């Protein structure tokens, strides 16, 4: 199991919006250059973020705006927009364990609650971090460079 790079690309994108918002229009082509990826991937992620109601993409002159204050958008919100889990379950259980096997018939009883607890802990931790934390962090790192 691995969360795809789309999640960290989305966070990178939000950091760029913060750093460059007063200097330039942050477009998909500009973001692709910063992230070093194809603009098509950026546009897909922007579409997902827009569909989730986290951003507005300005047509014509270009640019991206947040729809809420950065402190009101959590990493979990971004994760949900970018990495929606099938049926709400992070862990995809293997299909049809053998009921004739003592392990196979009991594996769900053994693991279901534990896997759900792991998912809940991860999601709760993601709710603790916001885009405001990301913005503060990038500002501090840039000040240290100067």
Image: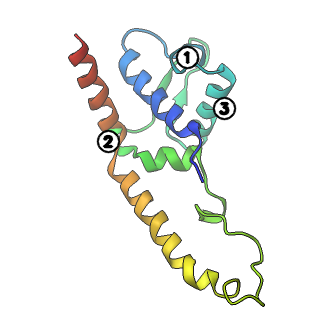
Q: Residue 106 in the image: state x and y as whole percent.
A: 64, 87
Work out how far the residue at label 2 is from the one at label 3, CA to CA, in angstroms: 24 Å
Q: Quadrant of residue 96?
A: bottom right
Q: Which residue is at 44% across, 9% downward?
A: 24
Q: Is residue 118 left or right of residue 144?
A: right
Task: Provide the secondary structure element on which disc 1 rests.
Answer: loop
User: Which of the two labelled residues, at mark 2 and mark 1, occupies the earlier sequence position?
Assistant: 1
Query: Which numbered dot is residue 96?
Result: none
> Does residue 63 appear in this view?
yes
Work out how far the residue at label 1 is from the one at label 3, CA to CA, in angstroms: 13 Å
Query: Which numbered dot is residue 71?
Result: 2
Work out how far the residue at label 2 is from the one at label 1, CA to CA, in angstroms: 23 Å
- Residue at label 1? 27
User: Which of the two labelled residues, at mark 2 and mark 3, occupies the earlier sequence position?
Assistant: 3
Q: Which residue is at 55% across, 14% downward?
A: 33
Task: Provide the secondary structure element on which disc 2 rests.
Answer: helix
Q: Quadrant of residue 70?
A: top left
């Amino acid at each position: 199991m691995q969360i795809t790079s789309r999640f960290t690309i989305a966070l990178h994108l939000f950091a760029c919006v913060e750093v460059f918002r007063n200097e330039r229009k942050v477009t998909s082509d500009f973001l692709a250059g910063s992230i070093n990826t194809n603009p098509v991937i950026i546009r897909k992620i922007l579409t997902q973020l827009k569909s989730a109601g986290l951003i507005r993409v300005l047509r014509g002159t270009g640019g991206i705006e947040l729809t809420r204050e950065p402190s009101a958008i959590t990493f979990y919100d971004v994760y949900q927009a970018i990495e929606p889990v099938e049926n709400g379950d992070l862990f995809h259980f293997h299909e049809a364990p053998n009921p004739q096997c003592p392990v196979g018939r009991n594996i769900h009883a053994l693991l279901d609650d534990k896997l759900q607890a792991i998912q809940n802990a991860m999601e709760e931790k993601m709710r603790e971090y916001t885009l405001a934390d990301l913005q503060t962090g990038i500002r501090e790192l840039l000040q240290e460079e100067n």
